[in-house]
Amino acid sequence: MNNKSESDKPSQDEFFYSHTVDVSVSKTSMPENENNPEIIKELIQDELLLDGNARQNLATFCQTFHEKQVHELMDLSISKNMIDKDEYPQTTEIEMRCVKILAELWNSKNAIGTSTIGSSEACMLGGLAMLYRWRDKMKAMGKDSSKPNMVCGPVQVCWHKFALYWDVELREVPMEVDCLHISPKSMLEYVDENTIGVVTTFGLTFTGKYEPVKELADALDKLEEESGLDIDLHVDAASGGFLAPFCAPDLLWDFRIPRVKSISASGHKYGLAPLGSGWALWRERKDLPDRLIFHVNYLGGDMSVFQLNFSRPAGQVISQYYLFLRLGMEGYRKIHEYCYYVSVFLGKELDKIGIFKILYSGDANDGIPCVTWTLKDESECSFNLYDFAEKLLDKGWQVPAYSLPKNAEEIVVQRIVVRRGFSIEMAELLIKDVISTIDYFKENKFSIDESHKKLSGFIHN
């Protein structure tokens, strides 16, 4: 028998009362009955509180701040299927307007292109076009086309996927301690007549620096003059493609270089669009082989399609268009210049501490708004950067520590990516926490051994 009176029952108006307290929902199987949507939303919302704070995530290159109008446009477009061009002709028109804007931004009058689900799909499309152009060329010369290779520096994992999925030998020029990117000299040692193209990264995920696109193109021009070997360039401008046009407009990296046949970029990085936004552009129509374009008519009209994905949301493209119109050249320039300002500030403050060697600190002509550092050899710290990253996480800061790729793997670095929404005030708070973390290790010394070397939980995306 329940002896509690009615007055003992908690009131639904009580401040800390939640209507979820009596609800238990299976987490691994489908419930038998339907549930109240508000209750289920609150249950999931409470679980999501256990995720890290996105604004303190200094590992990701992806945007974590969006204006309310972007949220509203994403809501408006949630049921629009980007692929259904006949049903949503105005969305298709908006996509083509974005391509024209990007073509102008990347200095081409004749470029064609498409939206993608992030720059990884855009890279795949750029790689496929290179592969098919090379095959056609080899066939026209009566040569074997069964052993294609691709030459690149330290690339994002999507290029490893491309090489594996399409059976292309990936010739990744290894980093060297004194050269953390592909150089013209090292590139030329890897190319031959079976090279479908050279991929250069305009904003390396490992350090944030731009690879020397113009120097690589010049070296390939000279190679063609001397040997007749004609090798295309693809620029993976995942981050830099939406930075250099605004903050380093005189830097040559885009379609102003004749050897650059295609460019891929992430709209959801410094294009400021929501996650799932990417772009792939080709210099001219002839640079995108016809065999890669499919025509479908079962959605209501004849449509040309060149994407790996088929059904996909339209909100990202519409939001990208909104941002182009809303911000314009001036707005993008202001936002990105502020990001560079913050990254330079962080580099100077970290350098003042005395134990860090700054590898890159956000020069607009050299790379993205990013700071990368390692411990000085003479610092004699009682911690390594893996320990340091883990301890910073106690304060909520996600600052990745990782070793560099082959031939430079003994170098362990940390990296901060400065994005829209990361203010100078937040940077000052971060520096305070960095100093307090160093003080913690001074007061709690321990010897470094292999057990402290933990794999980073951060992915280069």
Image: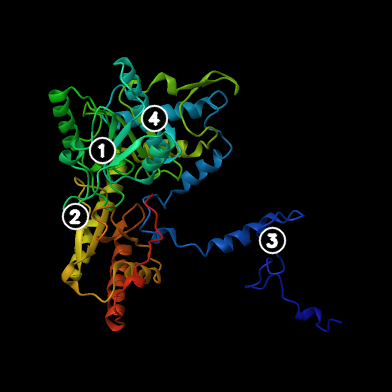
Q: In percent of the image, x 45 and y 36: which residue is there?
A: 317
Q: Which mark is residue 26?
A: 3
Are discs 4 and 1 less than 8 Å apart at CB?
no
Q: Taking 382 as reference, is 405 above or below it?
A: above
Identify the mark nearer the N-term, 1 or 3.
3
Label 2 belongs to which residue? 177
Estimate how packed mark 4 is, as few (under 14), some (14 to 19) or many (20 or more) residues with alpha carbons within 10 Å.
some
Q: How is the image coloured?
A: rainbow
Identify the mark nearer the N-term, 4 or 3.
3
**What percent of the width, then of the height, locates residue 316?**
47, 39
Label 4 belongs to which residue? 128
Label 1 belongs to which residue? 245
**What percent of the width, then of the height, locates residue 378?**
16, 71
Identify the image quadrant of residue 288: top left
**What percent of the width, then of the height, locates residue 359?**
20, 57
**What percent of the width, then of the height, locates residue 203?**
28, 45
Identify the mark nearer the N-term, 2 or 3.
3
Secondary structure under tag 1 reads: helix
Q: Is residue 236 left or right of residue 64?
A: left
